[in-house]
Image (cartoon, grey):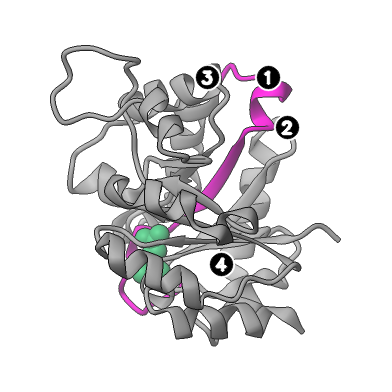
């Protein structure tokens, strides 16, 4: 069986000192493909840490442009320069707080794909979408705009994260059945083999159940992996 993937999304947390201290206490497992998505300011120090041989470090966003007059933005070349291995694109906080549109996210994915930067593409419905029975329609539209036209070679650099907006940071995770249903739908809709991660209130107690589902290849974890002891517990709970 292939390794399960666990990506910690640190969001806007930690200083460089805190990040490096975390890495010195982190206990990766050979059974898990472990990665951390961190703020731009942390990535270089993290990439230089010896633990980088065992886990990957990535960014939480990037520009769709290569270079130029884009104040405040960060390019792929700049990400590569500081040692980033991957980038998370279209996280619901980017979509909802910063009003990134499906088209802007598509442009970022296209840039990542063209330049061969592995990316995690996030999709997910709001509570309103789910309550009105539209979750699959919404996810299918997000996927279509994000990924239409890419071929098998491009898909080898892309992973999808299914993160229902109502489950992110709320403590109200999807059930494993709800997640499995959407994951198998995503795998049906996407024309090539793709890994799909679940995100939204994953914690030490529920991660093993999610990852035992046939269509769930891994997890994108926010709050529960901010503390390194919790992160170690979560990894340990997956090892059995
Ligand atoms: P959460 O966040 O685990 O704190 O719900 C997940 C995410 O936003 O990726």
Outermost residue, left direction? 71
Residue 55 screen position, x and y as percent: 60, 57
CA gap, disc 4 and disc 3: 35 Å
Q: Residues within 10 Å of mark 4 (few under 14, many from 20)?
A: few
CA gap, disc 1 and disc 2: 8 Å
Which secondary structure lies at badge 4? Answer: helix
Please tell me which of labels 4 and 1 falls first in the chain: 1
Q: Nearer the viewer, mark 3 or mark 1?
A: 3
Which corner quadrant of the figure contains ligand 1?
bottom left
Which region shows up in magenta? 148-173
Q: Is mark 4 within 8 Å of ligand 1?
A: no
Up-down: is 32 above or below 240? above
Residue 46 screen position, x and y as percent: 43, 55
Please tell me which of labels 3 and 2 falls first in the chain: 3
Name the residue located 32 percent from the left edge and 17 percent from the top edge: 65
Up-down: is 171 above or below 81? below
* Residue denoted by label 2: 192
Q: Residues within 10 Å of mark 2 (few under 14, many from 20)?
A: some
* Residue denoted by label 3: 115
Does the residue at mark 1 contact the one at mark 2 (Cβ under 8 Å)?
A: yes
* Residue denoted by label 4: 178
Please tell me which of labels 4 and 3 falls first in the chain: 3
Q: Residues within 10 Å of mark 3 (few under 14, many from 20)?
A: few
CA gap, disc 3 and disc 2: 20 Å
Does the residue at mark 3 contact the one at mark 1 (Cβ under 8 Å)?
A: no
Residue 212 visible somewhere in the drawing: yes
Q: Nearer the viewer, mark 3 or mark 2?
A: 3
* Residue denoted by label 1: 151
Residue 26 screen position, x and y as percent: 52, 74
CA gap, disc 3 and disc 1: 15 Å
């Amino acid at each position: 069986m292939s390794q399960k993937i666990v990506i910690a999304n640190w969001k806007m947390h930690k200083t460089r000192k805190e990040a490096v201290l975390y890495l010195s206490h982190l206990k990766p497992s050979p059974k898990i493909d472990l990665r951390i998505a961190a703020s731009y300011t942390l990535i270089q120090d993290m990439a230089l840490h010896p633990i980088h041989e065992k886990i990957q470090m990535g960014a939480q966003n990037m520009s769709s442009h290569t270079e130029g007059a884009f104040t405040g933005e960060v390019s792929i070349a700049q990400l590569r320069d500081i040692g980033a291995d991957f980038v998370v694109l279209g996280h619901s906080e980017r979509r909802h707080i910063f009003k990134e549109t499906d088209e802007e996210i598509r442009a970022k994915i296209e840039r990542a794909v063209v330049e061969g930067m592995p990316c995690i593409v996030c999709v997910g419905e709001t509570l309103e979408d789910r309550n009105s029975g539209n979750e699959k329609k919404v996810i299918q539209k997000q996927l279509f705009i994000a990924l239409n036209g890419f071929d098998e070679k491009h898909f080898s650099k892309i992973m999808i994260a299914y993160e229902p907006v109502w489950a992110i940071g709320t403590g109200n995770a999807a059930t494993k059945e709800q997640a499995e249903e959407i994951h198998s739908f995503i795998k049906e809709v996407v024309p090539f083999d793709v890994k799909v991660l679940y995100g939204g209130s994953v914690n030490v107690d529920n991660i093993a159940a999610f990852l035992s589902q046939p269509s769930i290849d891994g997890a994108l974890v926010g709050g529960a992996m901010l503390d390194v002891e919790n992160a170690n517990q979560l990894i340990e709970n997956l090892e059995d």
